[in-house]
Each structure stands twice: as structure tokens, then as C-alpha cells.
Image: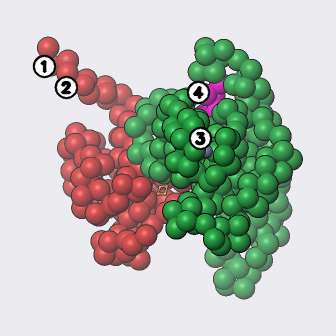
Chain colours: A red, B green
Amino acid sequence: MAYSDKVIDHYNNPRNVGQLDKGSAEVGTGLVGAPECGDVMRLQIRVNPETQVIEEAKFKTFGCGSAIASSSLATEWIKGRTVEDALAIKNTDIVKELSLPPVKIHCSVLAEDAIRAAIGDWKKKNGVAEAEPAAVTAQ
Amino acid sequence: MLKVLDSAVPVACWSCSVAHNESILFCPHCSKIQPPPGGDYFSVFGLAPRLDLDLGMLEHEFHRLSRKLHPDRFARALPNEKDWSLADTALLNDAYRTLRDPIRRTGYLLKLQGAEMGEEHSGKDRKDPSRVPADLLEEVFELNMQLEEMRMARKMGQTDPDLQADLTAAKKKFDGLLDAVDQDLRGQWKVWDEGDEAARQSAQKTMVALLDRRRYLSNLVRDVTETLGA
Ligand code: FES
Ligand SMILES: [Zn+2]
């Protein structure tokens, strides 16, 4: 399968590979897997407690090139955003940016799951209630 | 891609016009070759979908049909028949390769039943917690980290006996987990083959989850084996 240039770029020069201190209250960790292929991804964020801005994001992915590119892109995108803004990122945005083919969509889903899991972990640690689904306010 | 046609619809043989079930390679009436049938892989072998297959019989049937489809037998046949013999052979090979492997067979049958699995499934029921073996993720991730460490050390020309021992132990453990999954799968085969509709539904759910788990485990076992053996 032919990878897009953007995938190859992120694959060869992944941004923000690494890890953050899991024990820190400011850090949220998301560890997720794709049952479709058995690949795993860890994404971590460090959130400024005052502003709720994600100041640092790191990832480590054991998986295919598209999953590595998706998580690399995800860390770039969430850095500098507030937690709530980061939750607005959808896997379809990643698919578009990286021109992923249909068989690689699940790799982008993995990255979206990882963002959500990391933010969820941070919220739990800091006693922030999960945002209610939009449907509730729409009623 | 899977295409499941209704194999119960009878089709008339192109040669003798006698109606037959469309999922066969040769007309039961005049024995002429038929165009590639539209049924599932099981029906190529004259089987109803089932999981516990007699592999000896499957192989026997495969060889028998392969011989009947051999190009030599179509040297003087009509151009259509020649084309069909090639297409039928390709279908027979795909069917055999899929059905003789227990894991591929299980996955294939689950897909026939409408389960969404594998790479073309885009994570739609990811939110179903039964599909995410959380207990496994942590371990899989840690082991991957160790594997990477070992590969790096290797590259620098070092060996770390402790790490090596850890990985060997981990491989043993994951081999065991893989065996356990396979045993569970076989148990579910029986349930599916012999059960009523409700039992089948529940067996299908269980098998989808088992195959998910198995994918993590087999990736890992493959990587550990590769790294240890390098
Ligand atoms: S193939 Fe599994 S994450 Fe890409
Ligand atoms: Zn006939």
C-alpha cells in the first residue's frame, strides 16, 4: 500500500515521542489498543492546572506506520489547546490530513481514543467531571 | 471482499438446463463445469457453515476438485469452460486456504454472520468494553518496551542476560495465554455448530472477543520470538 507523503514524514520524523511522569497530577495517560490488528498506543498530556491548556504531549506507539503518524499528528494538534478543545479532534480530521485509505481508518481511531483516554485520566485525577454529552443541553 | 449470495436459489445448468443449487462447481446432472458459484466458501465443498471441520475430508475434497479442474481436462473445451476452470480453481484455492486454517475459518464464518472484524472494520464498536481487553494492554505495552530495549542493546553490540531471561519467561507466558484462547475458541465452535440461534448469537460474540484478544497475543509472541531468535 502506498503511504501518503505526510504519513511518511511523520513516520520518519515522529514528533513528541517519549513519556511523561505518570505519577504527576498534571499528567494524563491514555493507553489504548486496536483489536483489529493488535497494535497499542500510549499518549500522555501535561496540563496547566490554571489554564487547562495542554502544554506537553508525548506518545509511544507500537504499530503500523499510519498509527505512528496518527499519534504523532495528534500530539502536535493537541499541544497548546485546552482540554475541551482537544476533545473536539475527530479521527476523521486525522484521516483527511494524512490521506489515510479505508483500511487504515482504525489507526486514526486509535489516536482519537488515545486523546480521549489521556484526557479522561487527567480529569479523573483532578476531580474534573466528564463533560456531559451535547445531547443533554439540546433537550 | 466477501459476497454472500443466496445459495438457495436454483440456477439452470448452462449445458443441460437442469436446475441445480448454484453453489457447486460441476453440474450434478451432466457433470459439466459451471461458472464460479456465488455461495460462500463452505458451499464450494458442499458444506453448510460450521467450525469443527474434518480437515482430512476437506483436503481430500480439495484434491478431488482440483484434479477435476485441471487445465489438461479442458484442452478441448469451449472457451467459456476454460475460463471457468481457471476462475473455479482460484475460488477453490481461496476457499481451501481459508477453511483449513482454524483461525481464518473462524474469522470468515463470523464475518459471514455479519460480525465486523479485521482491518476493514473501522473501529465502530470500539466503545463496546468487551472488545477492549484492558488487562492485556498494559502488559502488551510493557513487553513491547522491553523488546525495543533489547533490540537497541543488540544494535550497540550488547546483550543483557536479565532482559533476555525476562523475555523468555514472557514468551512462555504469552504462549500459554495463546493456547488458552485457542482452547476457548474450540469450545465455542461446538456451541456454534450444535446450538440453536440464541446459543449461536452468544458464541459469536464470545468468539469475536477471543479473536481480538488473540490478535494482541499473536503479535506479541511473533515479535518476542523474532527478537529472541535474532
Ligand atoms: S494497522 Fe493497526 S493501528 Fe494501523
Ligand atoms: Zn448440467
Is residue A12 visible to us here?
yes
Q: Residues within 10 Å of mark 4 (few under 14, many from 20)?
A: some
In the drawing, what numbered circle is on residue A138? 1
Q: Of all residues shown, which one is farthest toward the front?
A: B16
The amino acid type, in three-letter code, at marker 2 is: Ala
Chain letter for the residue marked with disc 4 in the picture? B
Question: How far is the residue under mark 3 from the one under mark 1?
Answer: 52 Å
Q: Residues within 10 Å of mark 2 (few under 14, many from 20)?
A: few
**Considering depth in this image, is B35 or A60 the residue closer to the camera?**
B35
Q: Residues within 10 Å of mark 3 (few under 14, many from 20)?
A: many
Query: Decide: marks 1, 2 in contact (CB < 8 A)?
Result: yes
Q: Residues within 10 Å of mark 1 (few under 14, many from 20)?
A: few
**Can you identify the residue that label 2 sits on?**
A134
The amino acid type, in three-letter code, at marker 3 is: Ser
- Mark 2 or mark 3: which is in front? 3
Question: How far is the residue under mark 3 from the one under mark 4?
Answer: 28 Å
- First reached walking from the N terminus: tag 3 or tag 4: 3
Chain letter for the residue marked with disc 1 in the picture? A
Question: In the image, what residue occupies the spot 55% across and 65% down?
Answer: B78
Magenta span = B203-211
- Mark 4 or mark 1: which is in front? 4
Percent of width and height locating residue B129? 51, 29
The amino acid type, in three-letter code, at marker 1 is: Ala
Query: Decide: marks 2, 3 in contact (CB < 8 A)?
Result: no
Chain letter for the residue marked with disc 3 in the picture? B
Question: How far is the residue under mark 2 from the one under mark 3?
Answer: 50 Å
In the drawing, what numbered circle is on residue B23? 3
Question: How far is the residue under mark 1 from the one under mark 2?
Answer: 6 Å
